[in-house]
Image (tube, rainbow, N blue to C red):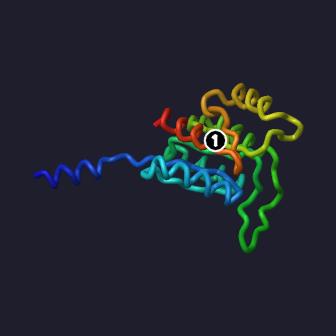
Amino acid sequence: MYCVCSIELKGNMHMKKLLLVEDLPEKADEIKKEILKEFPAIVIVEKSSYHSAIEEIYRHYNDYFLILLDISMSTFDVNIEENGGVPETLAGKRILEGMYLRDIPTKVKVVTMFENFDGKSISQLDKELKDDNPDSYDGFIFFSFKKSDWKKQLTNYIHSII
């Protein structure tokens, strides 16, 4: 009887999935390492371009409790046939706009290394994204390879929404 209950409980456990949209492999690896250290049961799905991200979000947004989104990325995934297309400074903003138009409410936290985007400061862009996407956009975390304060911000944020 005990084993049956144990199996049933295990089978009913809800798996948490997170979508990481990041085109810089080293940055993606650091983010994944930090999340999995604190939350080993979270499943992380990765997309590395504007097109692969919107395709995943539009089709499977209900699968994710959170999207970690870079702002600047390539248009397409880099592979043998594709060089990544054009680097897009505000691709993440366009992804958020598409989510808003489709009423996709999944929480989005921007994780960026840049302080300026097409002449806008991160604080200006943050206000704009909050105003334009009040249901999904939930602020930003400033990523750095040299500093580690982003790690605590990220894990605290995930704790707060799980």
Asked whether 153 or 149 is in front, the reply is: 149
Q: Which residue is mark 1?
A: 150
Horizontal side, residue 161 vs residue 14: left or right:
right
Q: Residue at x 49, y 32 (%)?
A: 160
Please tell me whether residue 103 is drawn above or below residue 72 in the rendered image. Answer: above
Say what secondary structure mark 1 lies in: helix
Give how far across and how far down residue 52 sits, in percent: 66, 56
Name the residue located 67 percent from the left edge and 40 percent from the top edge.
110
**Residue drawn at 33 percent across, 47 percent down:** 13
Q: Amino acid at mark 1?
A: Trp
Q: Position of residue 113 (x, y in %)?
A: 74, 46
**Side of 135 where 117 appears, left or right:** right
Say which quarter of the image contains residue 68.
top right
Residue at 64% x, 27% y: name it: 134
How many residues crowd mark 1 within 10 Å: few (<14), some (14–19), many (20+)?
Answer: some
The foreground one among 110 and 55 is: 110
How many numbered marks have been drawn onto this rendered protein structure?
1
> Whole-percent x and y of residue 53?
65, 52
- In the picture as drawn, the residue positioned furthest to the left comes out as 1
The x, y position of residue 133, in whole percent, is 67, 30
The residue furthest bottom is: 80
In the image, 15 versus 104, the foreground residue is: 15
Is 50 on the left-hand or right-hand side of 5? right
